[in-house]
Amino acid sequence: GENVEQHPSTLSVQEGDSAVIKCTYSDSASNYFPWYKQELGKGPQLIIDIRSNVGEKKDQRIAVTLNKTAKHFSLHITETQPEDSAVYFCAASISGYSTLTFGKGTMLLVSP
Amino acid sequence: KAGVTQTPRYLIKTRGQQVTLSCSPISGHRSVSWYQQTPGQGLQFLFEYFSETQRNKGNFPGRFSGRQFSNSRSEMNVSTLELGDSALYLCASSLNRAGGNTEAFFGQGTRLTVV
């Protein structure tokens, strides 16, 4: 089955810096890669996703890149703000199926 | 549009008991998936239901079961509870049209504590 590795497990940055979280996956059939943000006491919130026919996608301060050959994808957050502090999860799945395989998560702490 | 609703939010049960958790998906979504979240194992897939049929199942013992009703609402049941079943149980709702569109939206979860 699919295996998703996520690094780093914790990431501390200063407000205004950029943050990068990286994930690798094992199943070459995976073609849908969402990212979720989970705040304390809440369920995961979908923040951005990318499909295998796209190399990069941006949404304001957030961007995701995908390298299908190397089987890795990354989340980039620019101009970080304290409210970006949360746990971020990457996931992989095969389009048409709802099963998501998640990475272990990255705790992002943005200090003012 | 209302989001995914899970009830109850918190539960405390004793070892050996059984528990039923409920999930109401986003209106129009026909796929409901359940995940278990623990500090040690992270988010793990339990099962998925689509149009009242279990379409996929994760690697969990038979004590974990679920069902989906004709209105797409879903329930999951855990029998003979063990201490290790203490976790946040999350439900995800997806439109899941043919050809893709697997954006999954999660509820707030049910925090189950087994004592």
Image (cartoon, coloured by chain):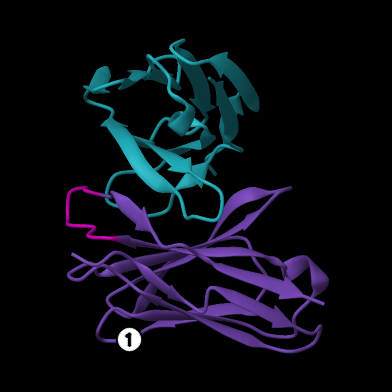
Residue that protrudes farthest toward the top in the picture: A17
- Where disc 1 sits, the SS reads loop
Indicate the position of residue B7 as horizontal and vertical percent values: 47, 78
Q: Quick check: A103 left or right of A10?
A: left
Residue B103 percent coordinates (x, y): 28, 49
Q: Considering depth in this image, is A97 or A8 the residue closer to the camera? A: A8
Q: Magenta part mainly helix, strand or loop? A: loop
Residue at 49 percent of width and 45 percent of height = A38
Q: Which one is in front, A43 or B16? A: A43
The tint chain B carries is: purple
Which residues are the magenta region?
Answer: B94-101
**Which amino acid is tagged 1?**
Phe
The answer to whether residue A97 is visible is no
Q: Which residue is at a point 65% across and 28% down the rendered structure image?
A: A9
Q: Residue at x 45, y 11 (%)?
A: A18
* Residue B113 location (% of width, % of height): 72, 72
Query: Quadrant location of the N terminus of chain B?
Result: bottom left
Q: Is residue A89 left or right of residue B70?
A: right
Q: As drawn, which residue projects farthest toward the front?
A: A112
Asked whether residue A107 appears in the rendered view, the answer is yes
Which quarter of the rendered picture does the C terminus of chain B lie within?
bottom right
Residue at position x 37%, y 20% from top? Answer: A68
Report if residue B99 lies within the magenta region: yes
The residue carrying mark 1 is B69
Can you give x and y, in whole percent of width and height, for residue A60 in the image?
24, 22
